[in-house]
Amino acid sequence: MKLYTFWRSQATFRVRIALNLKGLKADPVYVDLDAGDQHKPDYTSVNPQRVLPALIEDDGNVLFQSIAILEYLDEVHPEPPLLPKDPRGRARVRALSLITVADSHPLIVPRVRDHLAATFGLGEEGKIAWVRHWLKAGLDAWESHLARDKATGAYCHVDAVTMADLCLTSHAVSYRVFKGSLGAHPTVKRIVDRCMADDRFARAQPKLQPGAPAH
């Protein structure tokens, strides 16, 4: 398999964790989002939407959109499972995951930041403030749900890693990349720290990927 990736891509981070959890290997193909590589023909032929990630299977089948990739991997490689067995549990894990995937992350991606800069003259500091605002808003929602719900355990849903933990960890680590602190989100921090103590999460993190800045 081949995984089209960028060091800072939150969505690709989720997929890297899933591949590690499933014990699957994918050769990385680096797409520099800051340099605009996603707009080059060799990538648009893979994913016309020009976003990451894209996962190409051995037979050439192209998978895109991180949640679809995670659920596909879970169906084809069911161990360890990323979704609970019961319908209510699956609904909760999906809903938690979508706080990041549907509500927060889409607002901070490069194409949105670039549009803000081009349309409203937002400078670099303004773009970073925008990113922090929406990442924090998402973490506020995560914290409220996780701290309240009886189904929260050692991880987001009881005591096993699920898709929600992949989404939360990618969200929280992305917030830290943009110099955010988890001090106001103790339940989030507890779960993320537990996840990042797992090598399968830790070695997928942005700062360990090729192209990540040394600082």
Image (spheres, rainbow, N blue to C red):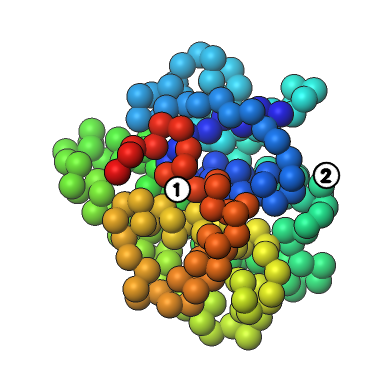
Q: Residue at x 51, y 14 (%)?
A: 41
Which amino acid type is marked by label 2? Val
Residue 129: mark in rendering? none
Q: Residue at x 50, y 67 (%)?
A: 193
Q: Earlier in the sequence, mark 2 or mark 1?
A: 2
- Residue at the extreme top of the image, as rendered: 41
> Circle 2 sits on which residue?
76
215 over 183 or under it: above or below: above
> In the rendered image, is residue 42 in sight?
yes
Residue at figure coordinates x 68%, y 63% from the top left: 162
**Residues packed near mark 2 inside 10 Å, few (<14), some (14 to 19) or many (20 plus):** few
Describe the element under mark 1 as helix, strand or loop.
Answer: helix
Q: What residue is drawn where x is 71% and y is 29%?
A: 1
Amino acid type of the residue that numbered disc 1 sits on in the rendered structure: Pro
Q: Is residue 97 visible?
A: no
Q: Which residue is mark 1?
A: 106
Specify whether 92 is left or right of 214. right
What element does badge 2 sit on? helix
